[in-house]
Every structure is written in C-alpha cells, then in structure tokens.
Image (cartoon, grey):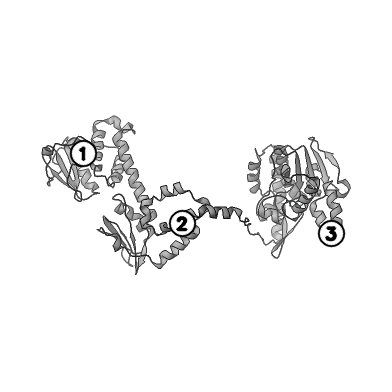
C-alpha cells in the first residue's frame, strides 16, 4: 500500500483484494482527519484514475498527484471502534469488481465515526450500496461453487471459470474442502488457483497463479459424456420452471457449462413430454411382503389390545380430525393395531364431503392398498356393476371401509386377504366414525358383516339381516347388505342373481 501526499491523497493498494492494506490506510487517513473526498484509491492492477468520480465530488485535475510510497501511521492514531459487522462487510465488498468500492468503504468508515446515527439507518444510501455489492459478491461465490466443471487431464482436474468479481481466492476453501484428495486447478482470466493434496506426510497446499485463457483449459473428456447423459436423463419436464431456472443459472454462465447445450432442446420438448407423463398409467408401489413369525404375531396381538384401549379412551376425550385431509394424514401414522405396520398405506374414504349416501366395505384389498383408493380391485369392479344396474353414479357416493389398512397373509409373492379381527375393527372404528361426523350422510350402506358390525356396534348375521334398514342411537340409518367379495366366491351362475340382490 502506498500513500502520496498533497491535497488529494492517492492510495495504492497491493492488488484488488488487499484488505490489510485498505485497513491500514483507512486507519491512518482517519487518524489524520483526511475526509473521503480528499482520497483517491487505486490498486496495483487498476489503471490510475479518479476511482470515485461518481460517488463523491471529483477532485480538480490539478489537485491529483501520482501515487507514491509513503509510510502510513504517521499521525496520532486513537483506537477506532466500528461495529464488527462493518469489518465483515469490508471483507466481502472488497471482492467486488467496482473500482469505487474502496472509496465507498472509507466513506462509510468516516461517517460511522462522525455520524453515530448512521449505525441505526439501514436505508442510508451508502450502506445500501455496500449491501448490494456484498450481495453480488456472495452470489458470484455461490455461482462459482455451482458452475465450476472439472475436466480430467492425467492425474489432475482442471476447470475454466469466469467470475464477475474478485472471488476466486475467497471461494477456494470450498473446493479444498470438497475435493481435498484430488489435485485440481481452477483457471480464470484474473488469477488461477491450484490445489496439491497431501502426499502422505505433509498437508495439502493451495497456490495462486496468474490468470489464464479459456484455451488453456482442457477439452471435454469421457467423464463429461457420462455427466451429459446423466443430466439429460434427470431432466424432469414436469418440474421445469424456466424463469426460476434462468434466475438460478443465468445465461451468461451457459457458455462454460457443458450441459447448457441441451437446455433449449430439453425445454422445447418439455410440454410434449409432460403430456406424455400425464397420459401414462401410474406405476404402483411395490408390494410389501414381510416375513411373519408366530412369536412376533403374538407379541403384536398383545400390543394391539393395549393400543386399542388407549385409542378408544382418546376417542372418548373427543380428539377428532377437523377435515378429511387431516383424517387421512393422521390415519397414515395409525399403529393402534398391528395391521398398519405391514400395509403400504392407510386407505381412507373418498367421495364428496357432503355425499348423501356413504358406502362402507370391510378393508382395502391388495389393489386398494397399492393405489390408496377404496373398492377399486375385483370387489370394487363388481360393486361398480351393481351401481350401474341401479343407475347410481359412483362419484355421488362417499366410499370407505370399516378397517383402513390391508390385512393379509403372505403366500409366496401373493398377499392373501385375511378378515380383520374384532379387535382390529374396534381399533379402526374411530376413523370410520370421524368420517361419518365429517360427511354427515343421510344413510349408510354396510357391505358385509365387518362393516355392519362396526356401524351397528353388535354382531350382525348377514344372511338373515341383509336387505334391512337399522337405525342407530344417533339416528343414522344403516342398510345391511352382502359384500361383493361374497359374490365373487359364489359359482358363476349364481352371481347374476346375487348381484341383483346386492343392488336391491
Ligand atoms: N376393497 C375395499 O376397499 N373394501 C372391501 O371391502 C374390499 C375390497
């Protein structure tokens, strides 16, 4: 750092990011009561000119002096106290490429000392300008971390990058941490950095080299071809947000990003690909086929008895979900009985929240468990046929089950339906009653014994009671009928007439 005398002081710093030099000079100028308008800042790589012409009143040409070496600290320096944030701000702002940054920082320092109120004025123009500069520097460092692309050359990885500010050395520690074991270099027009990892005994070392040209960086390698294939495959057209993408990855960086060559093509095809994805049949989750052991099953039964009594006690205390979404979310976590642990998901009811008729089946089957919807498997198809015969729209009904998880027994790769026990149905009852509370149907159709028993709170003999309406103590009317699965188990000739019975 050098100081030249005269009316206008010229300060020459040792390079564009010479923070120690700046601090030393600023302290000295302040001690000598030299106002910001009387100082002209330069760094050894900058052309010598008045660098803060736009920020402060320009010095008269004849007042300018060529920078010359001078000894700082000749005044009577009394300790200067500034908020610690100011030093942090200086560390960042000094990395900005705007040559006016030194003048701005010194003016801020001067004003902090002479205008105590400045500390409490975040909207002050100088403070805001410094904050904007700091933000731009941080953004530049972030972009460098995100957009540096190394290419392998023998035992070294080399990247080319063009930062907007003097951020290369400040960002280097990130790459050292990330690629500690690798020998690498990042070439930039202003300066380059090179990392040599530890060679057994010693520590790794970071070197700063002169700036380079893009042609000095290596061409694409085989690793890059792999990255490009990967990039094209992970590009998800359904998640494309063009504006956000360009904000995150501004076009000026594209020239050094190998994957950028595909962006236009991929974005142009995205809407067609998105439509294709929508039209595709959804893939189902894989079946979970756990291994049951008798010991584990017995332990689970014991735990279930405990959980059910707790659940019933909570029900009595009136803890009820506020809407069907909340109910669905809460049921996913239900482990009041052991079934939930082995199912893919809890399958709650679906249909209009103000449906006049609610239909209650037994429990989700294999298909329902995978798709998360009630009555969509073979029983559901039979049920749909009965609705068609009746001329009822499925969409007008609220369809649910007495038990929300699929109970099954694994048999090889298949999951065989198992009727839920009374205990399991009791553990699920509060979900069904909450659905009834939220939908408030005028009537409920119980498909089969499990649903009928849950709804009526007693054992129901389905063959003798089917086709009858029953009134509950809360006034809700329940029609008991056969479960479609019962028809599926009958010989085919009987099915047609039984289907008619289900519909009646
Ligand atoms: N699927 C259901 O959702 N419920 C049943 O009762 C049977 C199959």
Mark sitting on residue 53: 1
Between discs 3 and 1, the one toward the N terminus: 1
Q: Residue 2 in the image: x percent, y percent?
A: 15, 46
Identify which residue is drawn at 74% across, 47% down.
Answer: 402
**Res 28 visible:** no
Say which of marks 1 and 2 sits in front.
Answer: 2
Crowding at label 2, few (<14), some or many (≥20) Cα neighbours within 10 Å? few
Residue bearing the label numbered 2: 265
Q: Residue 389 in the image: x percent, y percent?
A: 80, 48
Q: Nearer the viewer, residue 447 or 201?
A: 447
Q: Quadrant of residue 456?
A: top right
Q: Quadrant of residue 227?
A: bottom left
Q: Quadrant of residue 310?
A: top right
Q: Is mark 2 within 8 Å of ligand 1?
A: no
Identify which residue is drawn at 73% across, 41% down.
Answer: 433
- Determine whether 114 is above or below 176 in the image: above
- Determine whether 127 is above or below 251 in the image: above
- Determine whether 208 is above or below 361 in the image: below
Q: Nearer the viewer, residue 89 or 136?
A: 136
Residue bearing the label numbered 3: 492
């Amino acid at each position: 750092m050098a100081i030249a005398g005269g009316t206008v002081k010229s300060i020459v710093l040792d390079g564009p990011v010479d923070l120690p030099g700046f601090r030393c000079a600023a302290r000295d100028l302040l001690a000598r009561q030299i106002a910001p308008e009387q100082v002209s800042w330069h760094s050894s790589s900058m052309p010598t000119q008045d660098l803060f012409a736009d920020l402060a009143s320009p010095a008269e040409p004849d007042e300018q002096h060529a920078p010359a070496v001078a000894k700082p600290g000749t005044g009577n320096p009394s300790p200067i106290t500034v908020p610690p944030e100011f030093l942090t701000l200086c560390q960042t702002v000094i990395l900005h490429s705007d040559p006016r940054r030194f003048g701005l920082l010194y003016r801020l320092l001067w004003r902090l000392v002479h205008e105590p109120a400045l500390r409490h004025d975040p909207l002050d123009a100088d403070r805001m300008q410094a904050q904007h500069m700091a933000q731009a520097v941080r953004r530049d460092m972030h972009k460098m971390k995100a957009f540096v692309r190394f290419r392998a050359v023998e035992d070294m990885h080399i990247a080319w990058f063009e930062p907007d500010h003097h951020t290369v050395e400040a960002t280097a520690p990130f790459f050292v941490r990330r690629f500690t074991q690798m020998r690498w270099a990042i070439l930039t027009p202003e300066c380059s950095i090179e990392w040599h990892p530890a060679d057994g005994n010693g520590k790794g070392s970071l070197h700063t080299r002169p700036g380079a040209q893009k042609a000095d960086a290596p061409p694409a390698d085989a690793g890059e071809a792999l990255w490009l294939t990967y990039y094209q495959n992970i590009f998800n057209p359904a998640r494309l947000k063009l504006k956000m993408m360009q904000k995150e990855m501004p076009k000026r960086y594209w020239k050094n990003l190998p994957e950028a060559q595909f962006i236009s093509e991929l974005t142009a095809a995205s809407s067609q690909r998105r439509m294709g994805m929508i039209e595709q049949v959804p893939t189902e989750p894989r079946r979970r086929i756990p291994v049951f052991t008798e010991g584990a099953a017995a332990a689970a039964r014991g735990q279930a008895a405990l959980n059910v009594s707790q659940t019933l006690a909570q029900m009595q205390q009136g803890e009820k979900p506020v809407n069907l979404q909340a109910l669905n979310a809460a049921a996913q976590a239900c482990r009041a009985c052991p079934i939930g642990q082995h199912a893919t998901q809890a399958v709650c009811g679906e249909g209009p929240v103000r449906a006049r008729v609610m239909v209650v089946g037994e429990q989700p089957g294999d298909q329902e468990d995978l798709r998360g919807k009630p009555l969509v498997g073979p029983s559901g198809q039979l049920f749909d046929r009965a609705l068609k015969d009746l001329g009822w729209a499925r969409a007008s009904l609220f369809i649910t089950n007495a038990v929300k998880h699929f109970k099954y027994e694994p048999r090889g790769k298949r999951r065989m339906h198992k009727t839920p026990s009374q205990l399991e149905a009791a553990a699920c009852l509060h979900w069904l009653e909450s659905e009834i509370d939220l939908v408030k149907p005028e009537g409920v159709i119980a498909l089969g014994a499990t649903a009928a028993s849950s709804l009526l709170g007693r054992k129901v003999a389905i063959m003798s009671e089917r086709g009858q309406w029953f009134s509950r103590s809360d006034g809700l009317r329940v029609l008991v009928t056969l479960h479609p699965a019962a028809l599926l188990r009958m010989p085919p000739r009987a099915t047609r007439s039984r289907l008619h019975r289900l519909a009646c």
